[in-house]
Image (cartoon, helix red, strand yellow):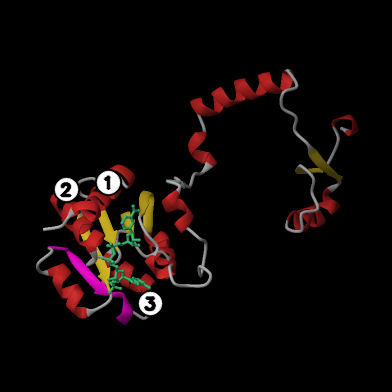
């Protein structure tokens, strides 16, 4: 048996990068390949619910029988990848082990649950294209780049107070300046808003509706 490098790729990607945990929903693309098949089996041992995609009915059958995946689909026979993922993951995906990139990745991202993790292992669907058909995420692989979404609203409370203290100090000491682009009056607001998308603002766009001295 020659599990070697693909096995290590599967193990590290699943547990170190994606941090898959018991009870989570895991999706694996190119699931019957050297890496994908091990990912699926390790995820099952860890107590995850695992679905794989592959490019033939024979491979799908292998995933569902010998390899013990909970479910699998033939992506070449699915007209709508998003619908296939919704069918397999009605509650969404926690972990995506991405071997293929492209259209599959895009559909998966829409199905991911909050705090989901994507281990970008490979982008095989993009390798032989003259230009990648979307964002060139293969850059993430070779450089071990971590990409993570965030919402500022998660940083309210104590974190905000820490930020406020530190930023007030920087502003007082002149280490940070805040450039503002001020337009006067509410009538100027629509043009200012449209201007944001044409890059007309320099710094933070502010609409001065009224001045304190005018009150
Ligand atoms: N990050 C790392 O350190 C590392 C290490 C090893 C491998 N990798 C990457 O991991 C991925 C899987 O490697 P592997 O060794 O498991 O591959 P593999 O055994 O060679 O299997 C590749 C499979 O990819 C699928 N595929 C090919 N073209 C595709 C396309 N256009 N769209 C969707 N699927 C396609 C095919 O299966 P279907 O019939 O299912 O389409 C093919 O059997 C590759 O992207 C590879 O570059 C990364």
**Structural crowding at the residue carrying mark 3, measured as other residues with C-alpha within 10 Å and reported as few (<14), some (14–19) or many (≥20):** few
* SS state under label 1: helix
Label 1 and label 2: CA atoms lie apart by: 14 Å
Q: Residue at x 16, y 50 (%)?
A: 47
Label 1 and label 3: CA atoms lie apart by: 31 Å
Numbered label attached to residue 122? none
**Disc 3 and disc 2 in contact, CB within 8 angstroms:** no
Q: Quadrant of ligand 1?
A: bottom left
Q: Is residue 178 magenta?
A: no
First reached walking from the N terminus: tag 1 or tag 2: 1
How many marks on residues?
Answer: 3
Which residue carries the number 3 mark? Answer: 80
Q: Quadrant of the C terminus?
A: top right
Single out the mark in the foreground, 1 or 2: 1
**Structural crowding at the residue carrying mark 2, measured as other residues with C-alpha within 10 Å and reported as few (<14), some (14–19) or many (≥20):** some
Q: Quadrant of the N terminus?
A: bottom left
Q: Position of residue 21 (x, y in %)?
A: 23, 45
**Disc 1 and disc 3 in contact, CB within 8 angstroms:** no
68 up-or-down from 178: above or below: below
Q: Position of residue 206 (x, y in %)?
A: 78, 43
First reached walking from the N terminus: tag 1 or tag 3: 1
Single out the mark in the foreground, 3 or 2: 2
Q: Which residues are magenta?
A: 68-77
141 up-or-down from 52: above or below: above
Which residue carries the number 1 mark? Answer: 12
Numbered label attached to residue 46? 2
Q: Residue at x 21, y 59 (%)?
A: 50
First reached walking from the N terminus: tag 3 or tag 2: 2
């Amino acid at each position: 048996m020659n599990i070697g490098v693909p096995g290590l790729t599967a193990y590290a990607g699943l547990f170190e990068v994606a941090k898959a945990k018991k009870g989570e929903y895991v999706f694996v693309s190119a699931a019957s390949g050297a890496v994908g098949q091990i990912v699926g089996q390790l995820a099952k041992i860890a107590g995850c619910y695992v679905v794989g995609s592959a490019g033939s009915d024979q491979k799908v059958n292998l995933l569902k029988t010998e390899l013990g995946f909970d479910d699998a689909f033939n992506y070449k026979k699915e007209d709508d990848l998003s619908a296939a993922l919704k069918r397999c993951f009605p509650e969404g995906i926690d972990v995506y082990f991405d071997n293929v990139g492209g259209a599959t990745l895009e559909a998966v991202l829409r199905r991911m649950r909050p705090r989901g993790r994507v281990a970008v292992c490979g982008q095989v669907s993009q390798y032989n294209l003259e230009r990648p058909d979307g964002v060139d995420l293969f850059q993430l692989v070779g450089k071990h780049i971590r990409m993570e979404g965030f919402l500022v609203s998660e940083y309210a409370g104590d974190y905000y107070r820490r930020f406020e203290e530190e930023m007030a100090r920087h502003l007082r000491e002149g280490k940070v300046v805040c450039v503002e682009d001020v337009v006067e009056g509410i009538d100027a607001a629509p043009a200012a808003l449209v201007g944001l998308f044409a890059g007309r603002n320099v710094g933070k766009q502010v609409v001065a509706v009224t001045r304190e001295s005018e009150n």
